[in-house]
Image: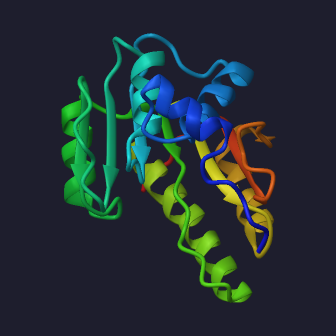
Amino acid sequence: MANYDRKDTYYLKAKEEGYRSRASYKLLEINDKFKLFHKNSKVLDLGAWPGGWLQVAKKLSPQGFIAGIDLVEIEPIEGVYTVTGDACDDEKINDILEKAGGKFDIVMSDMSSKLTGIREADQAAICGILELALFVMQKTLKQNGVFIAKVFKGGDIDKIIKEARKLFGTIKRAELNATRKTSNEFYIICLDYKATNV
């Protein structure tokens, strides 16, 4: 595995500008390209710890309802509703939907698995996380809504994305400047959700 500087330009910029992670700049870059957020958007972040994407969502949708869920407790962010728990837990998701007053305009996931170094196991875990995010998205996203997810090249990812195309009008792929040069991650921006009953 190639070495990288954990304290790179985006890491230092995040510290300077008060963001909790360098990943904040990925969401800002995505929004610059695709103009997804509006001032009153309702936004759900899956796997939201430490809260960098929540901070950006609140900045971009200051009058919206912003919520995040993670297995790890998220330090409070003013004006953001956070839940500690599993995104597969119907009780937790129903609680969030109740607080939001219905489904979300944007559901997003920057989740990734801890890599083991065993290629087959890592690829299976990466695919599993995207499938999980898609499963929860179908419970929480409004008709014509937007889904944003981090994915990694390899394994059955392309098959999963092909299946996901049936759920959306358009799926766009984005490789970001804010992604580390050593990473094989990219993002899918899924537009015009065709709501289904799950």
Which residue appears at 69% of the width and 19% of the height?
32
Which residue appears at 60% of the width and 22% of the height?
36
Q: Nearer the viewer, residue 147 or 10?
A: 10
Q: State the scheme by which the image is colored.
A: rainbow
Which residue appears at 79% of the width and 69% of the height?
2
Q: Is residue 146 visible?
A: no
Q: Quadrant of the N terminus?
A: bottom right
Residue 47 placement: quadrant: bottom left
**Image coordinates for residue 111, horizontal then vertical, percent:** 52, 57
**Image coordinates for residue 71, horizontal then vertical, percent:** 30, 62
Classify residue 186 as left or right of residue 133: right
Position above or below: 179 against 57: below
Classify residue 101 as left or right of residue 127: left
Classify residue 134 as left or right of residue 76: right
Which residue appears at 25% of the width and 42% of the height?
82
**Image coordinates for residue 65, horizontal then vertical, percent:** 31, 24
Q: Nearer the viewer, residue 189 or 169?
A: 189
**Image coordinates for residue 188, horizontal then vertical, percent:** 70, 45
Q: Quadrant of the C terminus?
A: bottom left
Position above or below: 38 against 154: above
Q: Nearer the viewer, residue 105 or 60?
A: 60
